[in-house]
């Protein structure tokens, strides 16, 4: 297991360099000058412009800028936002818990509904439930996130008035951030109704962000289960006189989980992309919204740092997924 | 009263191109302590009839039987839940492919213990103890270590021993072995067969051995049922079958044994088992039978008496001669008639 881990971590290094390259050059390929954007409509004198250019180091050759950036990165220095003048790292981790909270809720929503739905569809293959679920999943997967979000807001926040429109919690409550997770912090604060308010704010963003993973997981679970259910060892399990629930839920599901876990791991990347839209629509103060704002301001250090940090998070999740395989299927663990 | 009594079992499969009859009015009885072998080539419905008995066929199968009784219980009238109390406990089955018949995600100990938990309600410690005993019984070396092994860490022969241990876990009254040695190396085949026979002798359980290996039949079985294209074509005690086969198909199978070959070239049965679309109207074996006449092609053959091995034939053989046969000139393929 240790050797396996070491090899996986070794793979992370080239990926990391690649991500830093892309992050550094792509934001600079965008038209627009961060200094001119900061100055706004008033404009600024050529002397002041040159002075600022030197201060941020934008006058140096591009490869020198990159090497300097990479050198700082290796030492854990993600730079300072040229707009807020705060370290990128601080900004990122101040907002990150909001995104993590939303992402965890969305992936739980997708897994808790998607896996049982896929299992039932596979067991009742060809039934009305199966066809209905697969059609719904296709619709869910094909729907643009922003349109789906607006639709839900119109129905549940507008017409029915069941859920709040945006934000993480009602303005009535205020308490210090301990973990950064609103659900946990609201419980710690002990204020009456705070948790309910935080939870109600989470419902719509969770559904919106979780819809695509839900559709993908349900379809993947169904097809994996269909394959596994025709295996010889399923017949053996039935020949032992086990209940259908045990045959499907223990013997079949455990084997079907491998591709499903892979899918869930891959969905984490999609989740970040989805979070950008979802957070923008629901005014969710997470890194997705922060990234969009930083791109608009051409805040090079923030965009670069944010991209690299997100990439690191995705790599960590995939590493965890790889280790989960071995836990689910011992054959992978031993054969490496 | 026999341990297992199946009368006129029929299994139909729904397919995209209509119904397919995999098992056609097959009857079989097994007494306690008896070894009955079902032989026949691939596609003759051997496995399907036993899977139907175990209730393991997919939903596309329709199973009908005049009687299907096990140990005094009528299986046809039981609910799925009641049936599961018998299946895996008093009536167990092992399969052809030991490597794929065990779940790769669980230790062999877990998979054997599962039966003990479900049927006997043993606690964890008792399950482990009994599992180790069972592994020892089926000849697995250092069973206390092997109990925590995963199937992929064991060889095919060892996995088949595990399957046997699993089947034996609740002391079944009947064990169905569906080609238990086909997927194994020749040396291992003999070991597994010896193991099955030894345990059958020790426990006195009934054993149904599905095989297409006549050598295996000769060594192990008390009685033999020969199936062809879903029908039982002959049934005899093993000595009688090898001495004096009454159905031309049985005779052809036996003459194809290398030990019995008289010519330099090993005899074979021309053609293949009829499928869904080329099923003859009369005798199903008629297209491949060297004695076949017009009557064989047109009319469904009658079931002969016990003296003629219950053969499903118009002209059952006695010492190699077809009784009541009109002679070589009436056969459809004179060249084949000797």
Image (tube, rainbow, N blue to C red):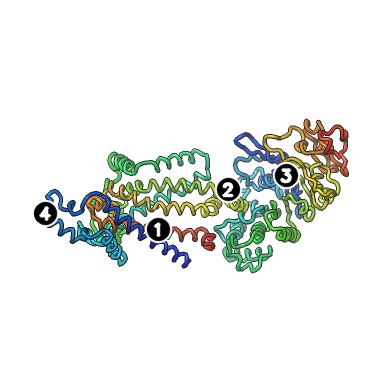
Crowding at dot 4, Cα within 10 Å, few <14 / some 14-19 / many 20+, comes out as few
- The answer to whether A129 appears left or right of A179 in the picture is right
- Disc 3 and disc 4: Cα gap in Å? 101 Å
| x 62%, y 37%: residue | B14
Q: Where is residue A48 in the image (x, y as percent from the top left)?
A: 13, 57
- Disc 2 and disc 3: Cα gap in Å? 27 Å
- The answer to whether B42 appears left or right of A295 in the picture is right
N-terminal-most mark, 1 or 4: 4
SS under mark 4? loop
Chain bearing mark 2:
A
Residue hosting label 1: A317
Crowding at dot 2, Cα within 10 Å, few <14 / some 14-19 / many 20+, comes out as few
SS under mark 2? loop
Residue hosting label 2: A230
N-terminal-most mark, 2 or 4: 4
Chain bearing mark 3:
B
Report whether mark 2 lies on the same chain as mark 3.
no
Q: Are circles 1 and 4 on residues that touch, CB within 8 Å?
A: no
Farthest residue, direction front? A61
- Disc 2 and disc 4: Cα gap in Å? 75 Å
Chain bearing mark 4:
A
Residue hosting label 4: A45
Asked if residue A294 shows in the view, the reply is yes
| x 81%, y 48%: residue | B265
SS under mark 1? helix
């Amino acid at each position: 297991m240790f050797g396996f881990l070491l090899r996986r971590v070794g793979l992370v290094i080239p990926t990391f360099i690649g991500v830093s390259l892309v992050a550094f050059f792509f934001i600079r390929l965008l038209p627009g000058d961060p200094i001119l954007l900061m100055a706004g409509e008033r404009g600024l004198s050529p002397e002041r412009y040159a002075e600022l250019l030197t201060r941020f180091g934008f006058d140096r050759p591009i490869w020198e800028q990159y090497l300097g950036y990479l050198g700082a990165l290796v030492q854990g220095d993600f730079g300072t936002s040229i707009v807020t003048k705060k370290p990128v790292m601080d900004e990122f981790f101040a907002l990150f818990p909001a995104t993590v909270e939303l992402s965890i809720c969305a992936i739980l929503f997708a897994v808790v509904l998607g896996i049982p739905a896929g299992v039932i569809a596979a067991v009742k293959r060809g039934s009305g439930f199966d066809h209905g679920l697969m059609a719904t999943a296709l619709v869910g997967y094909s729907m643009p996130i922003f349109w789906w979000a607006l639709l839900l807001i119109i129905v549940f926040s507008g017409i029915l008035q069941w859920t709040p429109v945006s934000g993480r919690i009602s303005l009535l409550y205020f308490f210090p951030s301990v973990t950064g997770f609103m659900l946990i912090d609201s419980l710690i604060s002990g204020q009456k109704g705070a948790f309910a308010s935080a939870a109600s704010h989470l419902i719509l963003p969770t559904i919106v962000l979780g819809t695509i993973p839900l559709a993908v997981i349900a379809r993947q679970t169904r097809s994996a289960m269909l394959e596994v259910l025709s295996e010889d060892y399923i017949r053996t399990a039935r020949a032992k006189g086990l209940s259908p629930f045990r045959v499907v839920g223990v013997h079949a599901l455990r084997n079907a989980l491998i591709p499903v876990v892979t899918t869930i791991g891959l969905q984490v990347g999609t989740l970040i992309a989805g979070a950008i839209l979802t957070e923008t629509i629901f005014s969710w103060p997470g890194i997705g919204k922060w990234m969009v704002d930083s791109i608009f301001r051409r805040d090079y250090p923030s965009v670069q740092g944010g991209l690299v940090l997100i990439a690191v998070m995705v790599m960590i999740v995939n590493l965890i997924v790889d280790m989960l395989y071995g836990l689910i299927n011992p054959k992978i663990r031993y054969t490496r | 009263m026999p341990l297992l009594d199946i009368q006129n079992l029929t299994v139909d499969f729904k397919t995209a191109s209509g119904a397919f009859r995999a098992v056609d009015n097959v009857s079989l009885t097994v007494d306690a302590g008896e070894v009955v072998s079902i032989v026949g080539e691939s596609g003759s419905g051997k496995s399907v009839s036993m899977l139907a008995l175990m209730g393991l066929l997919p939903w596309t199968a329709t199973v009908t039987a005049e009687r299907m009784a096990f140990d005094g219980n009528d299986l046809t009238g039981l609910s799925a839940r009641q049936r599961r109390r018998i299946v895996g406990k008093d009536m167990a089955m092992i399969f052809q492919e030991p490597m794929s018949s065990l779940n790769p995600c669980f230790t062999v100990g877990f998979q054997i213990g599962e039966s003990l938990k479900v049927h006997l309600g043993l606690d964890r410690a008792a399950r482990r103890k009994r599992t180790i005993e069972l592994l020892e019984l089926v000849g697995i070396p250092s069973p206390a270590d092997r109990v925590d092994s995963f199937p992929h860490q064991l060889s095919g022969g060892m996995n088949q021993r595990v399957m046997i241990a699993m089947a034996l876990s609740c002391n079944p009254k009947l064990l169905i072995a569906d080609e238990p040695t086909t997927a194994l190396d020749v040396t291992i085949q003999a070991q597994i067969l010896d193991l099955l026979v030894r345990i059958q002798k020790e426990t006195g359980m009934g054993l149904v051995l599905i095989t297409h290996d006549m050598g295996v039949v000769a060594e192990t079985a008390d009685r033999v049922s020969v199936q062809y294209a879903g029908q039982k074509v002959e049934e005899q005690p093993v000595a009688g079958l090898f001495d004096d086969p009454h159905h031309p198909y049985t005779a052809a199978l036996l003459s194809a044994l290398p030990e019995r070959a008289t010519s330099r070239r090993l005899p074979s049965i021309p053609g293949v088992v009829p499928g869904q679309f080329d099923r003859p109207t009369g005798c199903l074996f008629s297209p491949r039978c060297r004695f076949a006449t017009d009557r064989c092609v047109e009319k469904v053959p009658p079931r002969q008496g016990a003296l003629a091995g219950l053969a499903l034939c118009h002209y059952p053989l006695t010492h190699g001669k077809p009784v009541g046969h009109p002679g070589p000139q009436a056969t459809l393929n004179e060249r084949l008639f000797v």
